[in-house]
Every structure is written in structure tokens, then in C-alpha cells.
Amino acid sequence: MYRSYTGAEIRYYINTVSGDTYVTEFVKGITDGEQRTDETFNAWDYVDE
């Protein structure tokens, strides 16, 4: 989890087999829980094997 300067809690969910990743965001007092964002990527593109 990463807390940015906006106070948003950002979580990255990574499939450990495929590397497919999606992102959720939660802002206390603004959102009603985690909301999935449009951001997706493959984590294995950023890791040296």
C-alpha cells in the first residue's frame, strides 16, 4: 500500500503467475471503499529475471 500526497490509499494487486496487475484507490471520507482504477500493467515487464 502506498499513501500519496493526496491521502489516497493505492493498492496494487498482482497475479504472481501471469504478472497481470490492477490498481485500486481509496480516499477516506470521499469514496465508499476501494474503487478499481483503469490502470493495468504487467509487473513482469519491470522485473529482471
Image: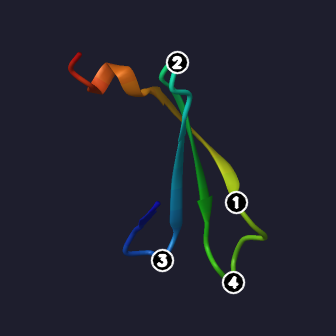
Q: Is residue 20 found left or right of 29 in the rendered image?
A: left
Which element type, helix, strand or loop, lies under badge 1? loop
Q: Which residue is mark 1?
A: 34
Q: Nearer the viewer, residue 28 or 19?
A: 19
Q: Which residue is mark 3?
A: 7
Q: Is residue 2 found left or right of 31 in the rendered image?
A: left
Residue extending furthest right? 32
Q: Whole-percent x and y of residue 45?
A: 33, 20
Q: Nearer the viewer, mark 1 or mark 4?
A: 1
Going from the N terminus, do you reach mark 2 or mark 1 first?
2
Judging from the image, the colouring scheme is rainbow
Q: Amino acid at mark 1?
A: Glu
Residue at (37, 75) in percent of width and height = 5
Q: Amino acid at mark 3?
A: Gly
Q: Which quarter of the picture shows residue 4?
A: bottom left
Labelled pair 2, 1 in contact (Cβ < 8 Å): no
Q: Which circle marks residue 20 in the picture? A: none
Going from the N terminus, do you reach mark 3 or mark 2 first?
3
Q: Whole-percent x and y of residue 32?
A: 78, 70
Which element type, helix, strand or loop, lies under badge 4? loop
Which element type, helix, strand or loop, lies under badge 3? loop
Labelled pair 3, 2 in contact (Cβ < 8 Å): no
Q: Residues within 10 Å of mark 3 (few under 14, many from 20)?
A: few
Q: Which circle marks residue 29 in the picture? A: 4
Task: Estimate the spatial distance between the alpha carbons at disc 3 and disc 2, rounded to whole Å.
Answer: 31 Å
Going from the N terminus, do you reach mark 4 or mark 3 first?
3
Q: Whole-percent x and y of residue 41?
A: 47, 28
Q: Which residue is mark 2?
A: 17
Task: Estimate the spatial distance between the alpha carbons at disc 1 and disc 4, rounded to whole Å.
Answer: 12 Å
Q: Amino acid at mark 2?
A: Val
Labelled pair 2, 4 in contact (Cβ < 8 Å): no
Residue extending furthest bottom? 29
